Amino acid sequence: MTEPGFRQKLRAELETPLEHRPFGSGWLSGMLAFLLAVGCLVLSLCRAFPGVFIMPQLRPVFEHQWFSAGLMAAMLAAFALALVSLALRPSRILGLTAIGLTLIAGLIGQFIGVNTNPDGIFFGLDFFVLNVILTGLLFVPLERLSPLKREQRLFRPEWREDLFYYFVSSMMVQVLTFLAMAPSNLVVAETGWQQFRAFVFALPLAVQVVAIMFFTDLIQYWLHRAFHRVPALWRFHAVHHSAKSMDWIAGARMHFLEIIVLRGVTALPMFTLGFDPAAIQIYLLIVYFYSAFIHANIGWNLRAVEPLVATPRFHHWHHGEEREAIDVNFAIHFPLFDRLFGTHHMPEGRWPKAYGIGGHPVPNGYWKQFLYPFQR
């Protein structure tokens, strides 16, 4: 039998079962060191090549004087935690990897990039890191404190595929935004509605945010339902439903072409009816975190608000493998639409027993799943 390689050893250490990583074993310090080191490396790359890897809206953050100090503090913390892990844990793969990545990040950090491409093509590497950090810091502790499935690990099966989906959608944020905005730009260019748009713009900001949620969810409901009922569309949407575990990052699993269609169609009311850009930004922030929330491995009892807004239990039933979970709960924000159109399903006090598609026809791996809709 051949000796496992570096990747296999690292993956095995990341996916160590809970009973083999008690407090004091060095696993937690090694894991924190590894995550900090990866974050520092990516942020150093962004800082060294801002015209390629930084979104224009986020470039002032990287140019702020506190950014360098924060990045240096994170590197020092990663190095210190790696040393603790090396001292406590027999397996040194996490600690040594963290030290190596931190040193590389420090070397790259010596190069201060020049923004030679302020308005050209960029890749949202910074967007990816900030998304993972912000959503991870919020939902990972919640999933550890109040898990629905206590045995489910942070690095559960298929975590690499879902993280890669997150990576691709973040890196291609400029392309996705351009394609998603195309239908809305066409509608705005071909219509007047100036008086109506002025009326909408003058509404209180909170009213605008709720209205955006209502109209986008109404359109999204019917589009989502079509992705389930039309066979050609279902093959794309089946990729999203192929996840066998539910957690905060599982919602990122979505076929690239479905993302374009979904964002392009649901953006129509948001960008064509005259809403204040501030209200749109607030909604985008809400929906980003809300999508992670309803997919999360959180077993909260939210019975009081379940009739009003979508909860993890509501959306988990949409992803259930059981027969009773097929083609139900299409809304993302308001269960009202499922009640009105006969697709609401919330069994009293129960959650699905398993997730995914019966028979699990969708293959594992990003590229195989990308090609899946086009295969006979």
Image (cartoon, grey):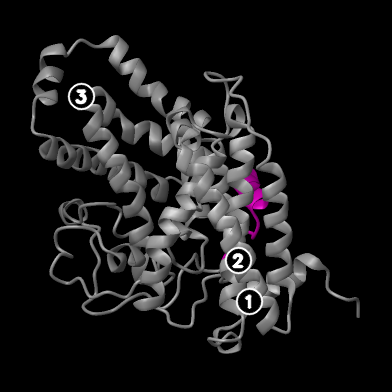
Q: Is residue 273 visible?
A: yes
Q: Secondary structure at mark 1?
A: helix
Q: Which mark is residue 84?
A: 1
Disc 2 marks which residue?
33
Q: Residue furthest right?
A: 1
Split into 4 quadrants, where in the image is the N terminus? bottom right
Depth check, front residue: 170 or 125: 125
- Distance of mark 2 from mark 1, alpha carbons? 9 Å
Residue position for label 3: 273
Q: Earlier in the sequence, mark 1 or mark 3?
A: 1
Q: Residues within 10 Å of mark 3 (few under 14, many from 20)?
A: many
Q: Which residue shows up at 52% across the image and 60% down it? A: 242
Q: Are marks 2 and 1 in contact (CB under 8 Å)?
A: yes
Identify the image quadrant of residue 298: bottom left
How far apart, in angstroms, are the residues tagged by discs 3 and 2? 47 Å
Q: N-terminal of the two: label 2 or label 1?
A: 2
Label 3: state its secondary structure.
Answer: loop
In this rendered view, identify the residue nearer to me: 319 or 57: 57
Going by the numbered disc 3, the residue's amino acid type is: Leu
Identity, as a three-letter code, of the amino acid under mark 2: Ala
Mark 3 / mark 2, whichever is N-terminal: 2
Magenta span: 360-376
Image coords of residue 24 (percent x, y): 57, 86
Give the amino acid at mark 1.
Answer: Val
Q: Is residue 269 left or right of residue 164?
A: left
> Is the residue under label 3 in contact with that under label 1 (CB below 8 Å)?
no
Residue 376 can be seen, yes or no: no
Image position, residue 81 (x, y; %): 60, 70
How many marks can you see?
A: 3
Near-viewer residue (96 or 138): 96
Instruction: Specify few, some or many for label 2: CA neighbours under 10 Å numbering under 14, 14-19, or 20 or more.
Output: many
